Amino acid sequence: MIYFNGFSLKGEEALFSSYLLENDTTVAGFSYGAQKALEYVYQNTTQRIDRLILLSPAFFQTQKPSFIRTQLRYFNTDKEAYIKQFLQNASKPSSIDLSPYVHIGTQEELEALLTYTWEKEKIQSIINRDIAIEVFLGKKDKIIPIDEAIKFFTHTTHYIIKDAGHILRRSDG
């Protein structure tokens, strides 16, 4: 399997083992990595790929430009504090500690994540190549506008985990 990490994370695929398929024909990604995974599959015409798994895809295309500017400003002011708050929000409603997976991202990566546009034409092109797309979303996601993401991905095979957040974990208690 080819896996793409989320923003400021490394090795977190272990958290998603119940969603992933370990084989040579699967491509997967979490959050920012979901964007990268989709682009990889879309542009790849030589390697056999049977399945694309998008875990909590980072979906910000409906946000106002002021939201993006604010996020970039906070990141540039104090990267460590920004990442700490980001990972706390990503883990909610669970209390999972994401610090073992922290790998501070760059301003360019954050800007790419926030300004990425998901295109239905790309998704349809992948489906037309007989590649299954599975999207997993947590209904209590505090990172992305979840209702808008659900609406966008409605034409894919998608799973909405009722009591889970961005990291697809439910409340611990």
Image: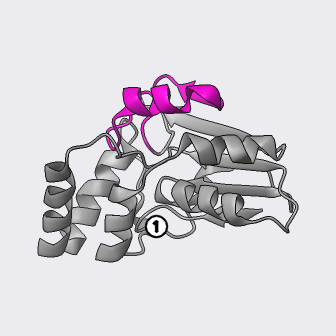
Residue at 18%, 50% in the rendered image: 67
Residue at 52%, 70% in the rendered image: 10
Residue at 39%, 30% in the rendered image: 148
Residue 37 as seen in the image, left or right of residue 107: right
Residue at 55%, 26% in the rendered image: 160
Point out residue 58 in the picture as x, y percentages from the top left corner.
43, 49
Element type at mark 1: loop
Q: Is residue 69 magenta?
A: no
The boundaries of the magenta stretch are 139-166
Residue 155 as seen in the image, left or right of residue 77: right
Point out residue 63 in the picture as x, y percentages from the top left corner.
26, 43
Q: From the viewer's perspective, is residue 172 above or below residue 36? A: above
In the rendered structure, which amino acid carries the disc numbered 1? Leu
Q: Is residue 162 magenta?
A: yes
Residue 37 as seen in the image, left or right of residue 45: left
Location of the C terminus (image quadrant): top left
Point out residue 98 in the picture as x, y percentages from the top left corner.
42, 59
Q: From the viewer's perspective, is residue 109 above or below residue 135? A: below
Point out residue 46 in the picture as x, y percentages from the top left corner.
85, 68
Q: Can you tell which quarter of the image residue 36 is in?
A: bottom right
Q: Can you tell which quarter of the image residue 94 is in?
A: top left
**Residue hosting label 1:** 9
Q: From the viewer's perspective, is residue 101 above or below residue 87? A: below
Q: From the viewer's perspective, is residue 21 above or below residue 98? A: above
